[in-house]
Image: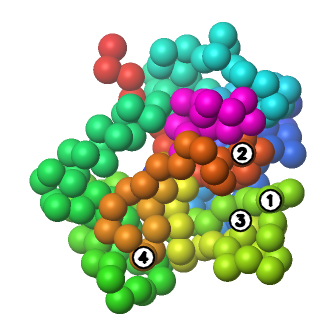
Amino acid sequence: ENLNYYTKDNDNLVANAWCYKNVDKNCNLGGRLYTWTAAMNLPSGYLTASAAEAIDSLHQGICPDGWHIPDSTEWYQLANYVYKVEGASGQLKSTKGWQSYTTSTVSRDPYGFSAIPTGAYYGTHTTPSGDYSQTTFDDDGFFANFWTATEAKKVTGAIYAYLDYRNTAMGFYSTQYNEKDRGFSVRCVKNSK
């Protein structure tokens, strides 16, 4: 399930983690939306600077002890495995909550991953005249976005994985729509050792 962790005692989370539309019950359903630095439990200064020297190989971030924020390689491995077995990595979607679309297949959620289309927090990246991201919180029912622990080539961005209501495959953004100050969901992976 999506992470729903918050404490006002952690400065990295204050003003960097939200319930969708700031409604508490949305956190209970779909977890919180975090900036990349909040997910990584790093100071906000890394929103506009490289955090390469601050990222561990299994970076705990805000995950519980013994767990870590998956990097892009781990997300790619998950998507590729599900694609090879199921024919569509979109089978990681929950069975409910997704807008219907003519070319998408309804997920059976055979792995119990249950990716909920929680939307995102767009903040300064809101585009009122655009097709998406029209409001500060938008796209619930349409997208499930997950931060990876991997920074993008531009220092203001990080790679994220997403599931789209129109597609049967998981996608990744590394060069656009990936500013670290956007709010996306977080999944944690249990350390193997």
Give the alpha-carbon distance from disc 4 to disc 1, as whole Å: 22 Å
Asked if the stretch drawn in magenta spans residue 152, the answer is: yes
User: Mark 1 or mark 4, which is nearer the start of the sequence?
Assistant: 1
Give the alpha-carbon distance from disc 4 to disc 3, as whole Å: 21 Å
Q: Nearer the viewer, residue 145 or 26?
A: 145
Q: Nearer the viewer, residue 28 or 150?
A: 150
Is label 3 in contact with label 1 (beta carbons under 8 Å)? no
State left or right for residue 133 relative to residue 111: right
The label on residue 179 is: 2
Residue at 24% in and 71% down: 108
Asked if the stretch drawn in magenta spans residue 71, the answer is: no
Is label 2 in contact with label 4 (beta carbons under 8 Å)? no
x then y, percent, for residue 51: 69, 20
Residue type at the position of mark 4: Arg
Q: Which residue is mark 1?
A: 125
Residue type at the position of mark 2: Glu
Q: Secondary structure at mark 4?
A: loop
Find the magenta span and give its range. Answer: 147-160
Q: Which residue is mark 3?
A: 20
Give the alpha-carbon distance from disc 3 to disc 1, as whole Å: 16 Å
The answer to whether residue 5 of the structure is visible from this angle is yes
Q: Secondary structure at mark 3?
A: helix
Residue type at the position of mark 1: His
Give the alpha-carbon distance from disc 2 to disc 1, as whole Å: 9 Å
Give the alpha-carbon distance from disc 2 to disc 4, as whole Å: 23 Å
The label on residue 166 is: 4
The coloring applied to the image is rainbow
Sort mark 2 into few (<14), some (14-19) or many (20+) by Cα contacts within 10 Å: many
Q: Nearer the viewer, mark 4 or mark 3?
A: 4
x then y, percent, for residue 37: 72, 33
